[in-house]
């Protein structure tokens, strides 16, 4: 049987019991790690695991390498939510607003400042239009509110502040939550934390995993 025919058979038949989805009107679920085979039940998947394990691991590694080494469509910073242009790599040219935890390019921040000066109005966030916090306490309160709403940017920023204050346990908790929500910089910071043994024993596997996840999401340093 050719490779193409074998692949077709695996897509329409359960890899364990051989039941045909077309003949028996059964919906098969694919192996999410490798996408090579399908199963009619969890029982069949477990029974077939010893036979499939080696091929599954090999294909899963190939798929991950393909994702890891392809060029990301954009950087992990994303686009400015106002002008919709890609945010620059240079962190001095962007700013994070604590009120909404949006990264905004300095061009849009400056344009908003000129508008406020011309109209003689109160200084507000160029994105959400909330008043600019006057103290560090107000900024922290804003970030806390955003963290409660599961905002990964707020978690990432607060984690960085915890790390600067040598509260590595707090930073680890916040960056872990942010990484679970897909934040690239949180993945990168966790990789660095595992590398330099801050708040946790060095774990090379976790260090590599988080660095790869950051790279996949377009983190330029990773």
Image (spheres, grey):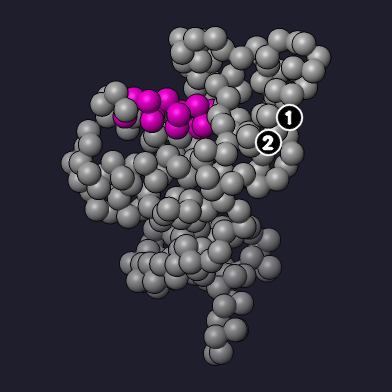
Local crowd size for mark 2, using a 10 Å CA cut-off: few (<14), some (14–19), many (≥20) = few
Residue 93 percent across, percent down from the top left:
57, 39
* Magenta region: 151-163
The local crowd at label 1, few if under 14, some if 14 to 19, many if 20 or more residues have their Cα within 10 Å, is few
Q: Position of residue 178 (x, y in %)?
A: 45, 34
Tell whether 160 sits left or right of 114: left
Q: Residue furthest bottom?
A: 1
Location of the C terminus by quadrant is bottom left
Q: Residue at x 51, y 40 (%)?
A: 91
Q: Nearer the viewer, residue 162 or 205?
A: 162
- Residue 179 at what x, y percent from top left? 44, 39
Task: Point out the residue furthest to the right here.
Answer: 119
Disc on res. 107: 2
Relative image position of residue 42 (x, y in whole percent):
46, 53
Task: Say whether marks 1 and 2 touch (CB < 8 Å).
Answer: yes
Q: Residue at x 35, y 71 (%)?
A: 54
Which quadrant holds the N terminus?
A: bottom right
55 in relation to 27, above or below: below
Element carrying mark 1: helix
Does 189 appear above or below 115? below
Q: Who is closer to the viewer here, 107 or 96?
A: 107
Residue 168 is tagged as none
Q: Secondary structure at mark 2?
A: helix
- State left or right for residue 202 relative to residue 215: left
Q: Which mark is residue 111?
A: 1
Q: Main secondary structure of the magenta part?
A: helix
- Mark 1 and mark 2: span between their CA atoms? 6 Å
Q: Is residue 156 magenta?
A: yes
Pick the residue in front: 159 or 181.
159
Residue drawn at 23 percent across, 36 percent down: 198
């Amino acid at each position: 049987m050719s490779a193409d025919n074998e692949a077709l058979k695996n897509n329409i038949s359960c890899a364990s019991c051989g039941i045909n989805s077309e003949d028996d009107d059964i919906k098969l679920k694919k192996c999410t790690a490798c996408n090579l085979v399908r199963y009619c039940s969890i029982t069949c998947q477990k029974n077939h695991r010893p036979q499939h394990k080696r091929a599954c691991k090999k294909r899963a590694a190939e798929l991950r390498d393909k994702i890891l080494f392809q060029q990301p469509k954009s950087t992990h910073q994303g686009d400015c939510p106002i002008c919709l242009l890609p945010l620059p790599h240079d962190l001095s040219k962007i700013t994070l607003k604590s009120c909404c935890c949006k990264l905004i390019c300095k061009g849009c921040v400056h344009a908003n400042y000129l508008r406020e000066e011309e109209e003689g109005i109160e200084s507000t966030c160029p994105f959400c239009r909330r008043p600019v916090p006057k103290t560090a306490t107000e900024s922290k309160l804003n970030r806390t509110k955003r963290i409660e709403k599961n905002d990964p940017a707020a978690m990432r920023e607060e984690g960085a502040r915890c790390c600067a204050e040598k509260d590595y346990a707090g930073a680890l908790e916040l960056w872990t939550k942010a990484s679970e929500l897909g934040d690239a910089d949180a993945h990168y910071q966790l990789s660095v934390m595992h590398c330099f043994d801050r708040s946790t024993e060095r774990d090379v596997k976790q260090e590599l995993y988080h660095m790869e996840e950051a790279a996949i999401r377009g983190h330029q340093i990773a």
